Image (spheres, rainbow, N blue to C red):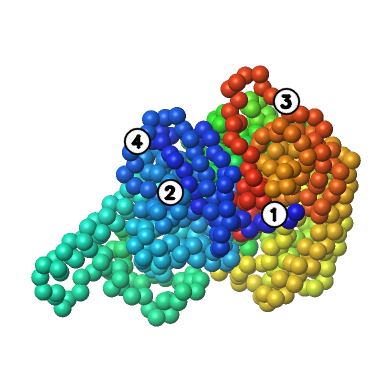
Amino acid sequence: MRRRHRCRPLVRLSAFVASTGGVADNIDASDSEQSSPSVQGRIALSRTATHRKPSASFAFISLGCAKNTVDSERMLGLLAQDGLILTPEPEDADLVIINTCGFIEAARQESLAVIREMLDLKRQGLVKAVVVAGCLAERLREQLVHQLPEIDAVLGVFGREEIAPLCRQVLAKALARQDKRAKSRRQKKQSKPSSASVSPDPIAVPQLEPPSHQRSRRALPILDESPADPRWLAILEQRTLFRPAPARPFSDQARLRITPRHYAYLKISEGCDRLCTFCAIPKMRGKHVSKPLEQILAEARELASDGVVELNLVAQDLTYYGLDLYGRPMLAELLRQLETVPGLRWIRLLYLYPMYITDELLAVIAGSEKILHYLDIPLQHINDRMLRLMQRRVARQEIEKLLERLRQAIPDLVLRTTMIVGFPGETEEQFAELCAFVAEGHFQRLGVFTYSFEPDTPSARLPGHLPEEVKQARRDRLMQVQQEVAFAWSRQQLARQLDVLVEGRHDSGSFIGRSYADAPEIDGLVYFRGAGCRPGDIVPVKITAADGYDLVGEMTTMPPRPSSASDSRTQPLSPSPGKAESFRRTQSWPPS
């Protein structure tokens, strides 16, 4: 049994889509298979609506964090409503859309590598057009077209709702180019070839060669400026679509979900008002704006009616929810309302900034049967000087008091956090302080990131940047410290009975699921013997063994079955959660 990695594989989606909108009736990710360098996650979608003959097909590649996944699902829903149809492989599609991640250097390199892979398919004539969307598009903007001029369109984060007409326009231009090339070939056959070359592109991109230092196939740096050539300006006007951040977040209803049917992510706000010196999220996602409570409840009801049992709330900072809209923190009230949504059984909170965790919020969590005793609170460091340089607005003493409050209010609380090592100026003594703090055992789940140099952030201008080998060595040392803590916690679960959400079957014939201590895709698993389980069931499991980050057990009672024959969870079991759980590839920088 292996620990699931935070870096999730690339998703390639296959669906058979009818023309109407709404949330998918049935999603089965059971036949995903791994290849190199990416995992092809095939998702079969069935609907009862009337079919409309699609005029074009597309493939969709989603990179990045859970918040980007929500954006991908919304774009997929819009494209399905427009009559476009997903294909299993990019090679079989007219159009490829890549929803990129751009938070840190590793994520940018990955996104650029995927873009180049798709552009290679375009050069080979296997796809007609490539559209790049998401955070990398928002961050690099016109520079992306300058560096990779064969991209057909670049769509910013806040142009998401215009994905369908943009793709129609891109495909129309691609077909026009194809027709022009075919006509040119026919004319050449009928007459003596001219000495003048014929451009394959009506806007003559191949003739506009970037400077020699920009022709490298390596990951490209963020440039200071784009070329002033009038021809490039015309290209940029045609090929880029950026919108300002909206006053209120978009609705995320009518999604075509790419998660397993029994869990989903729900984004309660957009953007971030924090000024962490290492983070570029506000530059890409704008200032914090909260969704109205009624809108969130409508989305939650829609997801629950589609079979969602576990609702994972995500944002750049959940605790900031409502301050801009209602004048006070409203997360506690939102949770009270979400508890009333029929069908939801688990509500999980991901990404809480430590400043606004109120006693009211803790009381709501402690007294709820649905809100899981699991909190993800990114701390990033414990040394006061490092926290000040990061501009985290909390000190070690405040963090320690918070941890004490959490344990007093919720004794069985599972805490996840993230730490950054190798921040500019971090000394060996400051790193040792961090290791000693983690060794105290506060966190059952912990992720470690090496500091990523981000050119457009304040930390880039700090002195004392450390070599990569030092940062990697510190990451490995801190993970070793945390591994001992996590493994000890796993051993403490022996003989305990835990409710487990069934994910699927393991190759050995046992079942795989997750307890309240395990967030999707980033934490451990529970392997257990049982019978009659289906994905989305929540069953009692007695823990009999610990295997590193994972637990092993026996189901103690059969899951209850609804008396109605209308139970919607009819998809077959996934043969291997090691595959089914890892749909997307992400390298998410600490989000809060």
The tag earlier along the polypeptide, 4 or 2, is 4
Contact between labelled residues 2 and 3, with CB atoms less than 8 Å apart: no
Against 587, residue 550 (above or below) is above
Q: Amino acid at mark 2?
A: Thr
Q: Which residue is mark 1?
A: 4
Question: Is there a contact, CB below 8 Å, between mark 4 and mark 1?
Answer: no
Location of mark 3 (residue): 560
The image shows residue 53, relative to residue 222, as above or below, that is: above
Front residue of 385 and 18: 18
> Is residue 422 visible to us here?
yes
* Sequence-first tag of 1 and 3: 1
Q: How many marks?
A: 4
Name the residue rendered at 56%, 40% in the picture.
Answer: 28
First reached walking from the N terminus: tag 1 or tag 2: 1
- Quarter residue 179 falls in: bottom left
User: In 3D space, how far apart are the residues under numbered discs 3 and 2 (Cα atoms)?
Assistant: 37 Å
Mark 2 lies on residue: 87
User: Label 4, on which residue?
Assistant: 52
Whether residues under marks 4 and 2 lie with C-beta atoms below 8 angstroms apart, the answer is no
For this rendering, which residue is in front, 217 or 272? 217
Q: Which mark is residue 572?
A: none
Question: Where is residue 246 drawn, in percent x and y?
Answer: 46, 45
Left or right of residue 251, residue 416 in this image: right
The outermost residue toward the front is 508
Name which of mark 3 and mark 2 comes first in the sequence.
Answer: 2
